[in-house]
Image: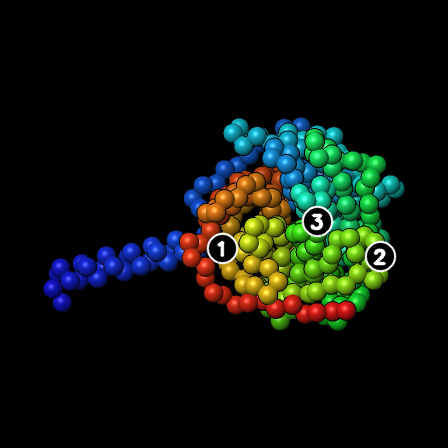
Amino acid sequence: MNTRRHLAIMIASALAVHAHADEAWHIGGSTAAWSVEGSVAGPNDISGAAGIQAGRGVLVSDETRVAQPFRYDLTTRLITVETPVPLLAGSGKELDLEAIAASRSGACYYATGSHGVARKSGKVQPDRLHVFRLPVDPATGAIKAGSIAVTTVLPVLKSDALLRDAIGKSSDLDGIDIEGLAEKDGTLFFGLRSPSLADHAFIIEVQAEALFANAGTATHRTYQLPLGAGIGIRDIASVRDGFLLIAGRSGNDGSTQGFSLHHWSGPGGALTKIGDLPAATGKAEGLMVLSETDTAVDVLIVYDGAVNGTPTRFEIIKPVMPSNPKRIEPNDHP
């Protein structure tokens, strides 16, 4: 092979690799850590963040009983926390709040407890078994504290043939542990960190109105996502063409590494790995969409075990052309 031909083949191969990279979901080179100002409730245990309006959002921590509104500035990369809003009366220590989702169409937030047992004692604690709806003032984005509604997803779990046996078990033994929540068009999608069964993690789909009207009669669908052995969902967020997921270990090995981002195009759609998240001082547990265009999604990730959640912005690049990974079909339940 002559030198000129060999060089042409090398250039063509390089261009093909570059084109393939551009066609795939991937994490862009732009990341930035943000600062937090003010007193954060449960500062070392931030588990979720979401925002309805530009410049405003809400944090939750799994060691508190409150939702904490905040303001943010994209230019200065500063989060300013505001007065926490109690979600449930009582003297209990925590609600084990693991995720929060924003519903722009419904002008509200949804937050969920893990619905799991206490990890250390293995005891069932009723305060962990709640889902909250937090209406907001459309003009200001402020939570209407007097209008917070409460329900539970426990009857849904009990009616699910795949998941009912996991109720009441520790997540270290493949027990129930909800850690992700997203809302799309009036439907809630609960992402389960545990159980992880046969290399699959689970998402439960249920209509929000039906769940809050009567959890005992709400119908649902369950989706199994092939994330790998011992891997569960740590958060889920709605985007235009589906959902973004944080995946990580389903058990509690204490590791702050091994977290990854995925795109799921939704019910009946495809699952695509976007990339691995860099090692951090905490566990990646909250995923908030800051903005979205036709070519990219800007997200804020918060970390459990890091001071004030160490919020960090990531740019996720969308594919130029759609890929064709494995499709995920639902398991229907009456």
Q: What residue is at 12 percent from the left and 61 percent from the top?
A: 3
Q: What residue is at 78 percent from the left and 35 percent from the top?
A: 144
Q: Amino acid at mark 1?
A: Ile
The location of residue 269, given as percent across then percent down, is 56, 63
Q: Mark 2 or mark 1: which is in front? A: 2
Distance between the alpha carbons at the discs numbered 2 and 3: 22 Å
Query: CB atoms at circles 2 and 3 under 8 Å apart?
Result: no
Q: Is residue 119 visible?
A: no
Distance between the alpha carbons at the discs numbered 3 and 1: 23 Å
| Side (left or right) of 333 relative to 124 | left
Q: Amino acid at mark 2?
A: Asn
Q: Secondary structure at mark 3?
A: strand
Q: Estimate how packed mark 3 is, as few (under 14), some (14 to 19) or many (20 or more) residues with alpha carbons within 10 Å.
A: many
Q: What residue is at 70 percent from the left and 69 percent from the top?
A: 332
According to the picture, the residue beneath numbered tag 2 turns out to be 214
According to the picture, the residue beneath numbered tag 1 turns out to be 274
Can you name the residue that lies furthest to the left here? 2
Q: Secondary structure at mark 2?
A: loop
Foreground of the two, 12 or 295: 295
Q: Which mark is residue 98?
A: 3
Corner quadrant of residue 162:
bottom right
Q: Amino acid at mark 3?
A: Glu
Corner quadrant of residue 168:
bottom right
Q: Secondary structure at mark 1?
A: strand
